[in-house]
Image (tube, helix red, strand yellow):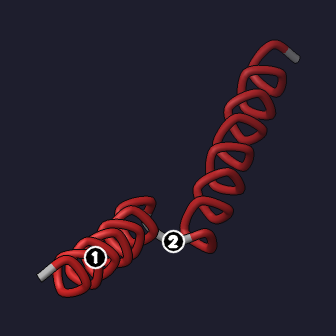
Amino acid sequence: MNLKKIFFSAVTVSVLCALTGCDYIEEGKPESSLLKQQEEHNNKIDLLEKQQA
């Protein structure tokens, strides 16, 4: 009985870890959104520099 409890606990934990990992993969890497924001800010800075020149 105790062995079954340990086994099912381990399976439950591993399934939960797998599910949260899958959600993270679907969202994508956080760096990609930060890189997009950085590129947008750099474009805005370039535009402002051109307007001031």
Q: To which residue does mark 1 refer? A: 48
Name which of mark 1 and mark 2 comes first in the sequence.
2
Q: Position of residue 18 (x, y in %)?
A: 63, 54
Q: Badges 1 and 2: C-beta atoms under 8 Å apart?
A: no
Which residue is at the front of the view, 9 or 32? 32
Which residue is at the front of the view, 44 or 2? 44
* Image quadrant in which you'd find residue 39: bottom left
Question: Residue type at mark 1?
Answer: Leu
Q: Position of residue 37 (x, y in %)?
A: 41, 68
Residue at horizontal 77 percent and vertical 27 percent from the top: 9
When the figure is inspected, residue 3 is found, relative to residue 46, above or below; the finding is above
* Image quadrant in which you'd find residue 19: bottom right
The quarter in which the C terminus is drawn is: bottom left
Q: Judge from the rendering whether residue 42 lies leftward or rightward of residue 14; answer left or right.
A: left
Q: To which residue does mark 2 refer? A: 28
Question: Residue type at mark 2?
Answer: Gly
Residue at horizontal 61 percent and vertical 69 percent from the top: 27
